[in-house]
Image (cartoon, rainbow, N blue to C red):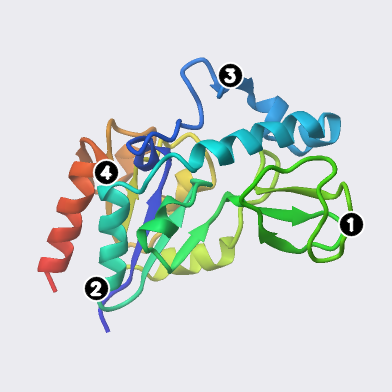
Amino acid sequence: MAASIVLLTGAGISAESGVRTFRDGDGLWEQHRLEDVATPEAFRRDPALVHRFYSERRQALAGVEPNLAHQALARLERERPGEVLLVTQNVDDLHDRAGSRNLIHMHGELLKGRCLACGAVFAWPGDMSCDSRCPACSGVGRVRPHIVWFHELPMDMDRIYDALQRCALFAAIGTSGHVYPAAGFVEAVGPDTRTVELNLAPSLVASAFHELRTGRATDLVPAFVDELLAGL
């Protein structure tokens, strides 16, 4: 069987579709302090604000489409023998819409909700509010966005680290190197694993990679996928 590949994507890949990156230069996210919209404490303090913020993000997501980089990664999974695991830090659904299936949303999914009463996770494409009802247990006022906030653990970490330790190639695409544990994935691979960073500019952890390619994701990723598929 062909050697396995693990791909990590960050905000840079979706930025080229028009999705705003997580942090602007002033540390704000869509003009909000992260402490006010992206922590469990914020949700307990002002759930209406948090709900309104993520409802606006859902509405904005409906106006963007997967780009050539998203499509190339889906093509790699589809056409290459062996496991291709895509791990994304992004909460949008652009990888899903592009056709990626072996996909982990380690920071959650914007178009899903989670019930704090029964633990159910469910599709939620529309607005969410303090009056929203859980479709599983019918509880009201206990539904929250299915997003990993600061001070919460990312999802499927055991599966991710297992894949990192087994893979022959690890590539990080459009990541800043600011956010852990994802920024440390390059240090978790085996000693013989090839590591490549593809980024608009070097990340904070670029020096840990064997190879750095700089440029737009929509240019770099399709060319990189072509190389991998040509090497079969």
Q: Earlier in the sequence, mark 4 or mark 3?
A: 3
The spot of residue 144 in percent (x, y) is 75, 47
Q: CA distance from mark 2 to mark 3?
A: 41 Å
> Of tags 4 and 3, which is closer to the observer?
3
Q: Label 4 sits on what residue type?
A: Leu
Q: Residue at x 70, y 26 (%)?
A: 35
Nearer to the camera, 48 or 40: 48
Asked whether the viewer can see residue 21, the reply is yes
Nearer to the camera, 146 or 27: 146
* Residue position marked by numbered label 4 in the rendering: 198
Answer whether labels 4 and 3 touch (C-beta < 8 Å).
no
Q: Residue at x 32, y 52 (%)?
A: 70
* Residue position marked by numbered label 1 in the rendering: 139
Answer whether labels 4 and 1 touch (C-beta < 8 Å).
no
Note whether 13 is above or below 160 in the view shown. Answer: above
Q: Residue at x 24, y 73 (%)?
A: 80
Q: Label 3 sits on what residue type?
A: Gln
Q: Earlier in the sequence, mark 4 or mark 1?
A: 1
> Of tags 2 and 3, which is closer to the observer?
3
The spot of residue 163 in percent (x, y) is 44, 68
Answer whether labels 1 and 2 touch (C-beta < 8 Å).
no
Q: Secondary structure at mark 2?
A: loop
Q: Which mark is residue 80?
A: 2
